[in-house]
Image: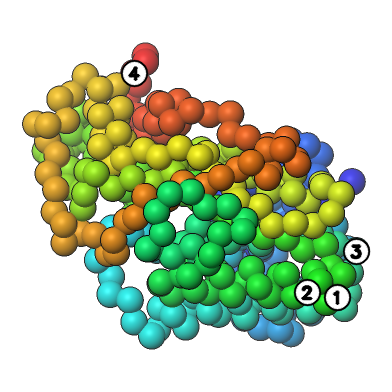
Amino acid sequence: MFKALIIGASGQDGTLLSRYLQKNNVEVIGSYRQTKSGSQTGAALLDITDRFSIDHFFSHHHIDYIYYLAAHHHSSQSTTVQRGSEFAACLETHVVGLMHVLEAVLQYCSQARLFYAASSLVFGETQEGVANEQSLRVPACAYGITKNMGIDVVAWYRERHGLFACSGILFNHESHLRSPDFVSKKVVRTAVAIKQGRAKELVVGSLAAATDWGFAPDYVRAFEKMLQSTAPKDYVIATGELHTVQDWIENSFSLLGLNWRDHVWEDATLMRRKKVPLRGDISAIRNELGWMPSTTFEQMVMEMMQKEMKYAGSSLDF
């Protein structure tokens, strides 16, 4: 049985990937900074910032696949001010920890294959249109800058040392496991709360903000496909379609029989950064690996609404 290590297993992607791999008879070890209870995966306490911790782990485990999903998360509608401490946290998580892992792989299990979860924010916030693997990367925030550095680190270990290491440049991808700090979950959760009388209004930064949003369970399949390919290569993982915040709201509220215009307000001060419409070109991964998203935007919203209603103690027959 193959064994996979998921670094950052407690997040949305780590949870979904763990379930997907286990269904495909892969033994999964999920790494956490703190002890987890009731986990569906084997648990390992692993501090990616501590080289000794990383070396100790890899010297005692035979690992076939490594999914580096660790991230210092953020939201475009968060009001948190970006300061040096945030940049340091991003650098430590997206670059330093990654280098520790790649060095350990090189020393203890050079046959292992590594996937690094990068971000569409590496393209920056001034481009408009479509981005692919050859597009200019000019990131403009700490998250994007350090994810971009991670892509280059992975490429260096691949080209200089011959490791099977690749990066997925991920556009936004959602599920019921998404944090409410993100607008997708905020819309879904607040719509249900309004339906149940627990809230009266939803305030968003911009109804017109457009993003390439995909369904996270589809994307974790792409992670696995990349590590099963014949040669390591970086790919853009996206849908190739743009939708607006208003699309999220209209779909969510209509499923509940609500008129969204009675409950939704805009507040531009909630926008942390300017959102420039950018969609991903998935021609490469579609043509070379046969991957493409299988869930439509409308299906994704419905799935998230159904889960949110279930957790809120209600049910609706859509």
**Residue 38 in sight from this viewpoint:** no
Tell me the crowding category of disc 3: few under 14, some 14 to 19, or many 20 or more residues within 10 angstroms, Cα based.
some
SS at badge 2: helix
Labels 1, 4: front one: 1
Residue at 47% in and 83% down: 88
Give, as a three-letter code, the residue at label 4: Leu
Q: Earlier in the sequence, mark 2 or mark 3?
A: 3
The residue identified by callout 2 is 157
SS at badge 4: loop
Label 1 close to label 2 by CB (< 8 Å): yes
Tell me the crowding category of disc 4: few under 14, some 14 to 19, or many 20 or more residues within 10 angstroms, Cα based.
few
Q: Earlier in the sequence, mark 4 or mark 3?
A: 3
Residue at 51% in and 40% down: 240
Color scheme of the displayed model: rainbow
Question: Which residue occupies the foreground of this view, 238 or 302?
Answer: 238
Label 4 close to label 2 by CB (< 8 Å): no
Residue at 34% in and 82% down: 83
Q: Position of residue 23 (x, y in %)?
A: 74, 35
The residue identified by callout 1 is 161
Tell me the crowding category of disc 1: few under 14, some 14 to 19, or many 20 or more residues within 10 angstroms, Cα based.
few
Q: Earlier in the sequence, mark 1 or mark 4?
A: 1
Give, as a three-letter code, the residue at label 3: Gln
Label 2 close to label 3 by CB (< 8 Å): no
Give the alpha-carbon distance from disc 2 to disc 3, as whole Å: 13 Å
The label shown at residue 111 is 3
Image quadrant where residue 192 sits: top left
Give the alpha-carbon distance from disc 3 to disc 1, as whole Å: 12 Å
Give the alpha-carbon distance from disc 1 to disc 4, as whole Å: 54 Å
The residue identified by callout 4 is 316
Would residue 176 be found to the left or right of residue 77 on screen?
Answer: right
